[in-house]
Image: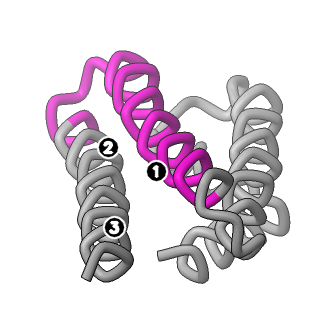
Amino acid sequence: MGAATAAYAVYALARPGHLTRALQAPSVQEPALDRLARTYGVRDLASTALLFTGDTGLVRAGMALRIAGDLGDCLILGTTTSDPAVRRKLVGTTLGWAALNAAAWFTDERGANS
């Protein structure tokens, strides 16, 4: 999940317009959404970097930050559109990432305690 999150972060930094397209937002909102996408990229790279430290406490903090970020994204992005289909896609994607990160954390913790 760390590698997948890092890959998304690089994508968000390189192609921030993906967020405007995903939200089906008007072009007037594109500059603000590009900044938001870049913010996601920086945030995701920073939290993912913690996963590769090898320090148990920092790894746990990185996972908690990832899940909190995904849940925050769900709340913020899920309220930015009045289109129910777009909202379902955004909520499903962000909750899906949160669930995958939680499952990865659970798996890591379980392996560490075995």
Q: Please tell me whether mark 2 or mark 3 is closer to you in this view.
A: 3
Q: Quadrant of the C terminus?
A: bottom left
Residue 18 in percent (x, y) is at: 61, 58
**Residue found at x 31% / y 82%:** 111
Residue 75 in percent (x, y) is at: 36, 21
Residue 67 in percent (x, y) is at: 42, 44
**Residue found at x 54% / y 79%:** 4
| Three-letter residue code for mark 1 | Ala
Which element is circle 2 on?
Answer: helix
Part of the protein shown in magenta: 59-87
Compared with 90, 26 (above or below) is above
| Three-letter residue code for mark 3 | Glu
Q: Earlier in the sequence, mark 2 or mark 3?
A: 2
Q: CA distance from mark 2 to mark 1?
A: 8 Å
Which residue is under mark 3? 109
Front one among 32 and 106:
106
Q: Main secondary structure of the magenta part?
A: helix
Which residue is under mark 1? 22
Magenta segment includes 80: yes
Magenta segment includes 11: no
Which residue is under mark 2? 90
Front one among 25 and 66:
66
